[in-house]
Amino acid sequence: MTTTLPPAPDTATAPAATKPRPTVPVHVRPVIRFRSSRPDLLLCFGLLAVILLVQGWNITHFPTLSDDEGTYLAQAWAVQQGDGLAHYTYWYDHPPLGWVQIAALTWLPSLIAPETMTVATMRFAMLLVSAACAVLLYVLARRLFLPRWAAALAMLLFGLSPLSVVLQREIFLDNIAVMWMLLAFCLAASPSRHLWHHFAAGLAAATSVLTKETMLVVLPALLVTMWRHSHRDTRKYAVTGAVTACALIGLAYPLFALLNNELFPGPGHVSLIDGITYQMGREGSGSIFDSGSGSHGVFTSWLYYDRVLPLGGLAGAALLLVTLRWSVTARALAGPALAVAILAVVAMRPSGYLPAMYVIQALPFLALVLAGGAASVAHAVLRRPVDRPAAPIQARPRLRGGVPGGAPDQGPQSRSRLGIGVRHVVAGLLALAAAAYVVPSWYDGNRDALTVDANAPYRAAASWMQNEVADPASTRVLVDDALWLDLVHDGFEPGTGAIWFYKADLDPAVTKTMPRGWRDLDYVVSSPTVRRDAVDLPNVKAALEHSKPVAVFGDGEDRIEIRRITGGER
Amino acid sequence: MLISVFVVAISVALFWMAAFTLWWQMHAWRTPEILAATRFDRPDGGVGLSFSLLLPARHEQAVLEHTIERLLQSSHSNFEIIVIVGHDDPETAAVAERSAARDPLRVRVITDTHEVKNKPKALNTALPHCRGDIVGVFDAEDQVHPELLAHVDHAFTSTGADVVQGGVQLINFHSSWYSLRNCLEYFFWFRSRLHLHAQKGFIPLGGNTVFVRTAVLREADGWDPNCLAEDCDLGVRLSSVGKKVVVAYDSDMVTREETPGTLMSLLKQRTRWNQGFLQVYRKKDWKQLPGFGQRWLARYTLMTPFLQAFSGVIIPLNVAIALFLDVPVGVAIVTFLPLITAMVTFVFEIVGLHDFGKQYGLRVRFVHYLKLIVGGPFYQVLLAGAAIRAVWREQRGRNEWELTSHVGAHLTETREEVHR
């Protein structure tokens, strides 16, 4: 038998009970082993059950099916069919990894029952992603040394905020990207500080960015987290390894384009550079501070669902960043707080495109810093010595990364029992006040999510198309992405029979099949999205003008009309 | 289609090979705890064991005296130095005798009378004369730290080891482009990879700064006089029968050495090692290892030079196929896998060079990093050449030692050029 020398006395993981010697900086680090900690497991999976119940109940009926969900799921369907990365020409609008993952997630059900591959049904697949995100968030909170109650709070904020419930139910790439980024953070904060954990963090981060490219802006915050959680002696290997891993995997995307001869623009083909130029040059939606702008509209729509998480999270991040010098919690959460700060700054840039799902990538970090802020306040109220407020850190032995909520009490004589009682009363009152503010508004928001049926018109339209159209195989319909897969399952020809409405104007391959414009079509399924975008799409606009509604579902702005083309010869 | 399958198979195999090598190469830095455990434990001051330090010297009259003097400065109080000289090498013998005359209690000279000389024969000649509990081996040009013996003593007594391997480090990275890479190879091997081998229970030992309990060594019949890598062979034989090997590395306590003076002598040295590895592989002592994983590690480690040569040729070829032949994009992406691991290795080498500079207080300049990167492919060619040469020589039964010359570039004093 052979072996290395017995490990040197390990200062890094010395038990917290060791008496700190003032001359040697002892790095007290309670190592949280999630998998072997029964209270953590019980708490986390108990909360997970609640979150999944709230997010899963009524998931197909609320919120309204979105066009983007349809796009991604349809492209995932194309991947499953072996049709390449999209059923229309893939044009480098987003890196394809996101819907490749959706294809993998929905592969088994779509194999067993192909007709379940529709937006509403496949939202259930997103529950898996939500569950993974919620668990990872709890683990991350614990790895960032939040006490158990604060980790639970973060998980609840993240999973049950009405804003989260609405957005995490939808088939958005952002949700999957968040899952990978949370995994990257968890690995970066790995308690064993293992080189390959950090390396894997780089891989996960690259996967996240290739799932949704906007995650790129969060990478500095990941780097900060890794820096703080690595050990001085191995840091240079760990951090360079992670950066290398991230860069190399990220480069696979341009490499893919290069191998397809589609890296650089050229006549007759799409290119990655063109795709990036389009995304960067997307018309700005104005500043969120300008009450008339689209960005402001998006911002208020977030606040409509929940004010607590976005605004409270911002406040929490600000609190942590300001108290970085004094608070152990703030230092432990520097990474997530920085992520919130970066995302906030990017959202507040004077002009730029702010999509509705932008907030998704901020949700876990908002929840973390809000919970961290709460832990910080709780610590200040319950533990902080009142008689030495000026130099709280210097007065105590250095406890980098100690449990913020449970740092050892250094001034027992400074407080009487009465003082402790008062502190507990104050803490209790604060908690009560917070609960009194949050619970009613969340109750209202989540009641909608659990009861409202916003998709009845869509279902009715889908069923009309299925039952009333005699010969789907030779019928041509303009339809929005959310309904497209329903039609494909009904026997419409994907791509040229069931047509994503905007492709009729924007994709030369489709336009070619309709030389006489609207006259070559039979139906338009006019949903709010179609009516909104038709303004800039001449063929779609003409089709709407030369058609009559044969069935209308719902009323007002949200109605869905099935319009038959009149005057065409088909 | 056939080309695609072939290319994918090769790429995936190369990827795993490179990934494993990288994984092992980075062993010491996996966690801060592992890194801390690779160091020598601080000795508690007691002297438990006595040492016999073997110093084979052949045409080393220029450096030998200095080496002996330095060894005598050791803080340990119970050791003897046995200098082994050849009967046909009067200059070196004269130097050795002079040192022995000055300190007859601690320095002795043994004369090796073998007609054809090599290092294992010299060591075996001295083995019966060893009086210490522990036999240690050094080379005539080694710079040995005075505290080393005390630390090794402590390592033996505190762990009950049968073998202790200390660190050896080439220092003169600034001498040439290949010495830079050569130094770094040693750094990764002794700083990191060897600890993994000790942990896994299969270890090819180094040629010097290696200490074995005298009884264990005699029981194993000393060194194999016909093996070109007698050090590796000894390690394999001892670990295969379950002897406990401990490895320790402290940057201020390594034995400092120099790289071969010319590219040709580096090629010869590497050929000898490779040929030695081949011989050890064919001796099959490693088959006694109890664990399946251990046997695979042995097989893989002893084959490494040849796999390395093979991959050096295949990786560029593979990428060329991906770029210029008409293969599906997915297949082309797969062909880049080995390149990715190669690049990760490159990056870790750059970091390693930085760390090396820090640990030894050496100033590593930008041009050195540049040399490291640019020299990489050429060094690969050199390794491939040595591997092919080794196979060829082994095939033709040429087993004589091609010796490496030393110029003393790692010593601070200027020295005349010597050859052994």
Image (cartoon, coloured by chain):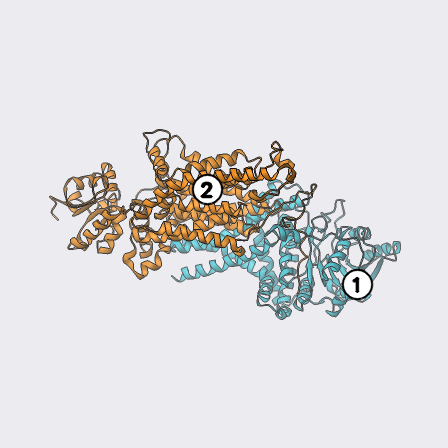
Chain colours: A orange, B cyan
Question: Residue B136: in sight, yes or no?
Answer: yes
Q: Position of residue A40 (x, y in %)?
A: 51, 52
- Horizontal side, residue B113 vs residue A561: left or right: right
Position of the C terminus of chain B by quadrant: bottom right
Determine which quarter of the picture holds residue B364. Answer: top right
Type of the residue with mark 1: Asp
Q: Mark 1 points at which residue?
A: B133
- Horizontal side, residue B314 vs residue A111: left or right: right
Instruction: Identify which residue, A426 or B151, lies in the foreground.
Output: A426
- Horizontal side, residue A3 vs residue A531: left or right: right
Badge 2 marks a residue whose secondary structure is helix
Residue A312: mark:
none
Q: Where is residue A371 in the image (x, y as percent from the top left)?
A: 48, 42
Residue at (82% x, 56% y) in the render: B91
Asked if labels 1 and 2 touch by Cβ distance under 8 angstroms, the answer is: no
Instruction: Identify which residue, B258 or A124, lies in the foreground.
Output: A124
Q: Where is residue A240 in the image (x, y as percent from the top left)?
A: 55, 45
Q: Mark 2 lies on which chain?
A: A
- Horizontal side, residue A152 vs residue B380: left or right: left
Q: Residues within 10 Å of mark 1 (few under 14, many from 20)?
A: some
Question: Residue A248: in sight, yes or no?
Answer: no
Instruction: Identify which residue, B328 or A444, lies in the foreground.
Output: A444
Q: Distance from label 2 to label 1 (Cα)? A: 62 Å
Residue at (17% x, 52% y) in the render: A475
Badge 1 marks a residue whose secondary structure is loop
Q: Name the residue under label 2.
A: A365
Position of the N terminus of chain B by quadrant: bottom left
Q: Which chain carries label 1?
A: B
Determine which quarter of the picture holds residue B414. Answer: top right
Residue at (75% x, 44% y) in the render: B412
